[in-house]
Amino acid sequence: MTDLPDRSQRRLGLAIDLDICVGCHACVVSCKGWNTTAYGAPLSDSDPYGPNPSGTFLNRIHTFEVKTGDATATVVHFPKSCLHCDNAPCVTVCPTGASYKRAEDGIVLVNEDHCIGCGLCAWACPYGARELDPAEGVMKKCTLCVDRIYNENLPEEDREPACVRTCPANARHFGDFSDPGSAVSRMSRDRGGVDLMPEQGTLPVNKYLPPRPRTDADVGADTGYGGPDNLPPAGSIDVLAPFLEPVAETPSGILGWIDRTLTRL
Amino acid sequence: MHPAPSIILFTVVSGLGFGLLFFLCLGFPAVSGWTAFVWFFAAYALAVGGLALSAFHLGQPRRALRAFTQWRSSWLSREAVLSVATLCLCGLQALLLIFRADGHPLLGGLAALFCLGSVFCTSMIYASLRTVPRWNHPVTPLVFCLTSLGGGAIMTGVPVLATPLLILLTAAQLGAWWIGDRRFADAGSTVETATGLAAALVGTRTTATAGATRVRLLEPPHTGESYLTREMVFIVGRRHATKLRILSLVCLVILPLCLLALPAAGPEVTIPAVAAHAVGAIVSRWLFFAEAEHVVGLYYGRR
Ligand code: SF4
Ligand code: SF4
Ligand code: SF4
């Protein structure tokens, strides 16, 4: 049923430490590796060795720059997978009942045998956490590695999500947010864990731990530039940068014709 | 949002079909016998054909029947259930008109209400998405319903029905654009709220710096396209939005209004008027998708 449970008994999820993530994409690869061979249909790639490779992933890393006025910018690597929202809009829009939130642990899953691949749940998710697999025609999303965390065939230390297990910097932590004493709850309390897009009303379970305060002196020590304005040494900007202009996105074919005609109007 | 042809045609064509059924069930034009058969056949062809088109954007169309199960929470499911119920009710009225030469007024009224309900449910699939602020307001269902009723009224060839509906549609369509253009800003989602970074980092630097904390995308997660960018970060074609808006209004209402104002009547007026209205509806619906910005674009530095 795509009605949401009133309250899930446990709230399993991830605490993602933005201070620690180094943006290595190891969790992306291990997530793809585990989930393409485990639960449900494999995660397909289209044109993997051709000019336009694209693929289905359940976890992706963005990199943002944060800057206040003229101060040195901070670069933050930003892993993003399903946040297993308490008020998950992706679940209620599903016409088939394929999407559901488990009452026992709060994990949001897709029953791939019932999914018709309408894509509405991906539209309803503000975070881009769902991707329609083009080969299978069904919706794929992070399962919180439900087939690992309860899997008694795995050694004890492997019973956590693949991304958490693999992270070389220990930036991803798995646990129960309904238990105030759990490591993830304490971490989130101590570090001021934030919800993404709270204005969307999704009540995410996953928390993001913001980067720790840092001073310009720290930055100087990190980079070796130092000095009051922390400028990189002259000449260190890549001389090839101007040649790296983005490729123009002009439509071709019938869209191109419409485009040219409308421009002339 | 990516303007998929199957979805655009599905919403426009099924809307026209339900619009025509609405008026046929209410007795405009008053038809019976073979004439009724032809009218209802045309309306069914549009409504059913439109609904069938929607299957083309499903990844697993063979399981489409499952979409009838979740009417308690999902507008898409409600739309499926209500459309089938509507087609059954209209079918009963059609049978009465064809074989008994007289419909049942209560049944006709109920069927007409269901027609409107089906179009309303279609529109609510989009209007209920908070993630697409341009759609997420009450004028969206108003435009869908009035487009459908306006088209149906033009087909009946009765100007007293069509003219006021088309004028209302103009107002609703202009209103939808006016509200839609402001919705994203009003919804309050920014790259700062999407990442939670600006608020978290304010005041963490010892250097006293003036100015707001700004977040921008430095590196996207992938250099090529993905399902997300193809489906939800569609930006090609928006630069012609104003011209297309004018074109759509001209076809959607102005041409049909002019044609209906002519002293002549009959198919030589109705057919071009319907054709113009349909083209206008398709352009307007294309814009509805192409101009819509999904909040996930904030994670990709483009909307
Ligand atoms: S992050 Fe997206 S897919 Fe995951 S539960 Fe929330 S709304 Fe649904
Ligand atoms: S794509 Fe599948 S899971 Fe998503 S809303 Fe449609 S049927 Fe439900
Ligand atoms: S919990 Fe599992 S499925 Fe989810 S992002 Fe991590 S590895 Fe991928």
Image: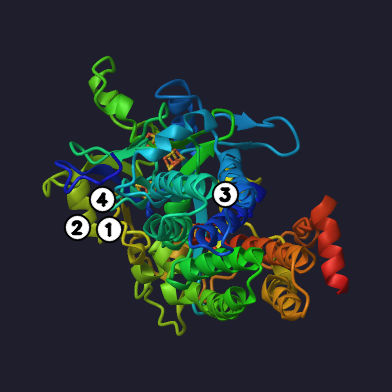
Q: Badge 2 local density, few (<14 within 10 Å), some, or many (20+)?
A: some
Query: Mark 1 or mark 4, which has the lower sequence index?
Result: 4
Residue A89, above or below B284: above
Q: The residue under label 3 is which amino acid type?
A: Ala
Residue lying at the far front in this picture: please name it: B100
Q: Nearer the viewer, mark 1 or mark 3?
A: 3
Q: Secondary structure at mark 2?
A: helix
Mark 2–mark 4 distance (CA, rounded to whole Å):
19 Å
Which residue is drawn at the image coordinates 86% and 64% (left, top)?
A260
Q: Label 2 belongs to which residue?
A: A189
Q: The residue under label 4 is which amino acid type?
A: Asp
Q: Nearer the viewer, residue B228 or A29?
A: B228
- Image quadrant for the N terminus of chain B? bottom right
Q: Badge 1 local density, few (<14 within 10 Å), some, or many (20+)?
A: many
Instruction: Tell whether label 4 touches label 1 (CB within 8 Å).
Output: no
Which residue is drawn at the image coordinates 78% and 75% (left, top)?
B264
Mark 3–mark 4 distance (CA, rounded to whole Å):
38 Å
Q: The residue under label 1 is which amino acid type?
A: Gly
User: Percent position (x, y) of residue B101?
Assistant: 52, 51
| Chain ID at mark 2 | A
Q: Nearer the viewer, mark 1 or mark 4?
A: 4
Q: Secondary structure at mark 1?
A: loop
Residue lying at the far bottom in this picture: please name it: B210
Q: Label 1 belongs to which residue?
A: A193
- From the viewer's perspective, is A72 left or right of A200? right
Asked which quadrant contains residue B227, the reply is top right
User: Percent position (x, y) of residue A191?
Assistant: 25, 59
Residue B47 is marked as: 3
